[in-house]
Amino acid sequence: MTAADQTTFRADLLRGKTAFIAGGTSGINLGIAKRFTRLGARVAVLGRNPDKARAAAAEIDADAGVSGTIALTADVRDYAAVEAAFAAAVAELGGLDILIAGQAGNFPAPALGMSANAFKAVIDIDLIGSFNLFRAGHQHLNLPGASLIAITAGQAVKPTPLQSHVCAAKAGINILIKTLALEWGPMGIRVNGISPGPIADTEGMRRLAPTPEAEAHVKAVTPLRRFGRTDEIGDAAIYLCSPAGAYVTGTILDVDGGTGAGSFGSPGSLGGII
Ligand code: HXC
């Protein structure tokens, strides 16, 4: 239990809740999984690599002082594999209260530097993967009251050199979130997005700001002048999933140090993307 848990949220806020977190084996989504588990939720994390999934589940358990976090393996591009992962999760957890589509792929490359398959790989992981998760997970949701979150990014609304694949995928995710919020709201399902800015200790920042110079530049163009923490994305997810967010749906919540509020970056530079 951290000081933040005691001051920010009641320690049992998510007790009795169940959560399925795709991409929960590392980075931002592992941070969300840890925050949820510390506040009493039972969590299943899904990744592509079984060893990494098992290690993440053990890390989440140790962090919260519990046992029973579920490690699942599937490629979100494979609908049948996603369905099987949900079946395995609900066999242990029962119905799902929270479903997070946090999986993502990214590499910086100009459009002329990527093959059609490279572009498609990111669309398939991010956008098609989010649809697959929400579509296959729907039948397992506890209704009314289920909360769905997709992790998007500022590239969804900001054309960004070297990120045509991510821009297109995340823009699709943003409109998917809003459309499903309309279709599923009457069923008692809320659908929202979180748009993180530069977050420390993530694969994304290792790829997009790989040198100390790039890191310094990103901080210099971030209004709050620092990287965010994975637990700060976790706190945003808790807000959206808890009773505090009960009237919020179809929203994209920027948790980005202010980077989405305007462009401080130099146009055309990778630092300008965030
Ligand atoms: C050009 C590239 C490339 C690169 C891969 N490809 N890297 N092309 N430049 N740097 C091409 C490959 O040659 C191949 O095309 C195609 O992409 C698919 O690659 P595979 O390795 O076969 O696919 P796969 O194993 O499915 O990997 C998908 C991936 C990979 C996206 C390419 O990077 C990945 O798995 N990433 C997951 C982890 C990740 O990226 N996390 C970061 C998320 S960060 P050909 O034509 O040769 O077949 C994030 C943050 C965004 O999303 C916001 C930040 C602020």
Image: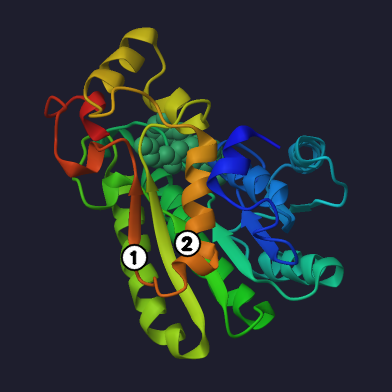
The mark lying in front, picked from 1 and 2, is 2
Q: In this rendered view, identify the residue nearer to me: 269 or 78.
A: 269
The CA distance from mark 1 to mark 2 is 9 Å
Is 117 displayed left or right of 274 in the figure? right
Counting from the top left corner in percent of width and height, residue 35 is at: 63, 45
Image quarter of the C terminus = top left
The secondary structure type at the circle numbered 2 is helix
- Residue 177 to residue 266: above or below: below
Counting from the top left corner in percent of width and height, residue 200 is at: 47, 26
Residue at position x 68%, y 50% in the image: 11
Counting from the top left corner in percent of width and height, residue 169 is at: 36, 55
| Number of on-image labels | 2
Assess whether mark 2 and mark 1 are in contact (beta carbons under 8 angstroms): yes
Counting from the top left corner in percent of width and height, residue 138 is at: 60, 79
Is 201 displayed left or right of 78 in the figure? left
- Residue 262 to residue 225: above or below: below
Q: Amino acid at mark 1?
A: Thr
> Which residue lies under the disc numbered 2?
240
Residue at position x 40%, y 59% in the image: 193
> Which residue lies under the disc numbered 1?
251
